[in-house]
Image: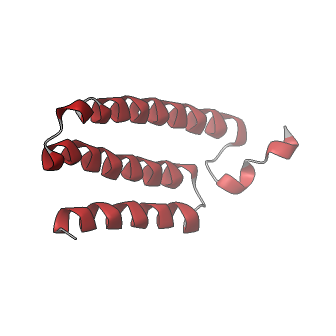
C-alpha cells in the first residue's frame, strides 16, 4: 500500500473515531466531519491522476460542493442550537423534547 493511501485511510479512520468517541460539543463533531470530507476530497482528487482516467475529474468538485453545503448546514445548526439552548453540548439536543 502506498504511503499516500495509508495517510488518507488513517486520516479518515482517525476522524471517524473522533466523531464516535468525542461527542460532547457540536463543534467538535462538525470538525471531525469536515476532516473526513477533506480526506475523502484529497483521495478523490488523486485517484484520477493515479489511474490516468479523465472521466472521474469532476468527482472532487462535486464532493467539495457537497462538503460546503454540509458545513453551511452544520454551522446553521450550531448557531440555532446555541441561541435556543445556550450552549453547543450534544446532550442538550434531544429530539424528544421538541
| Image quarter hosting the N terminus | bottom left
Residue farthest to the right? 97
Image quarter hosting the C terminus: top right
Q: How many marks?
A: 0
* Left or right: 76, with 62 as reference point: right
Q: Position of residue 66 (x, y in %)?
A: 43, 32
Question: Along the line of sight, which residue is nearer the eye, 97 or 67?
Answer: 67
Residue occupying the point 18% across, 38% down: 53
* 55 left or right of 98 in image: left
The residue shown at (52%, 60%) is 19
**Residue drawn 40% across and 31% down?**
68
Q: Which quadrant holds residue 71?
A: top left
Nearest the eye: 80 or 19: 19
Left or right: residue 36 versus residue 78 is: left
Question: Which coloring applies here?
Answer: secondary structure
The residue sitting at 29% across, 36% down in the picture is 60
In the figure, is residue 54 to the left or right of 24?
left
Residue 52 rendering spot, x and y as whole percentages: 13, 42
Residue 10 in the image, given as x and y percentages of width and height: 33, 67
Is residue 59 placed above or below 95 in the rendered structure? above
Reply above or below: 83 against 97: above
* Residue 44 spot, x, y in % from top left: 28, 45
Amino acid at each position: 500500500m502506498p504511503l499516500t493511501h495509508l495517510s488518507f485511510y488513517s486520516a479518515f479512520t482517525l476522524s471517524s473515531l473522533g466523531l464516535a468517541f468525542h461527542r460532547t460539543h457540536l463543534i467538535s463533531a462538525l470538525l471531525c466531519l469536515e476532516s473526513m470530507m477533506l480526506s475523502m476530497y484529497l483521495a478523490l482528487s488523486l485517484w484520477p491522476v493515479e489511474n490516468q482516467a479523465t472521466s472521474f475529474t469532476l468527482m472532487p468538485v462535486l464532493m467539495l460542493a457537497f462538503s460546503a453545503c454540509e458545513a453551511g448546514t452544520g454551522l446553521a445548526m450550531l448557531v440555532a442550537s446555541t441561541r435556543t439552548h445556550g450552549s453547543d453540548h450534544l446532550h442538550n439536543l434531544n429530539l424528544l423534547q421538541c
